[in-house]
Image (cartoon, rainbow, N blue to C red):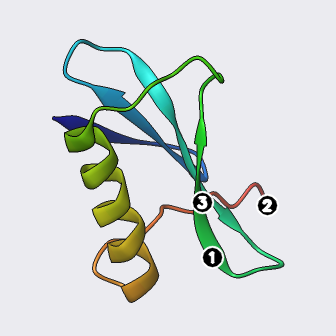
Amino acid sequence: MVLFWPIQQEIECINGSGVILGRIKFDGPKEVFTFSPDNESVVLSSIEKSSIDERLSGLGSGKYSLPMQDDD
């Protein structure tokens, strides 16, 4: 299980044990969503990877959205 928690213009990916796996961010110049691990030692289980891949796909297709912050 992976919990997806929006933080400003990113989404934290947290596993069932409460460990932050990384963040999903929008890469503006490439116009794609990417997952960045919290640190290089993070090893994703197949279920975690599948959940993150599904979220990335859903963000790209418009099924999910990423909250944007307007500081103005």
Vertical arrangement, residue 12 with respect to residue 52, above or below: above
Q: Helix or strand or loop: what does disc 2 sit on?
A: loop
- Residue linked to disc 2: 72
Quarter of the image where one finds residue 17: top left
Q: Helix or strand or loop: what does disc 3 sit on?
A: strand
Give the class, few, some or many, for how many residues have Cα within 10 Å of label 2's Cα (few <14, many ≥20): few
Tell me which numbered mark, 1 or 2, is placed earlier along the sequence.
1
- Residue linked to disc 3: 34
Answer whether labels 3 and 1 touch (C-beta < 8 Å).
yes
Outermost residue to the right? 29
Q: Helix or strand or loop: what does disc 1 sit on?
A: strand
Tell me which numbered mark, 2 or 3, is placed earlier along the sequence.
3
* Mark 3 vs mark 1, CA separation in Å: 6 Å
Which mark's residue is nearer the viewer, 2 or 3? 3
> Looking at the figure, which quarter contains the C terminus?
bottom right
Expressed as whole percent of the image width and height from the top left, the position of residue 19 reads 38, 15
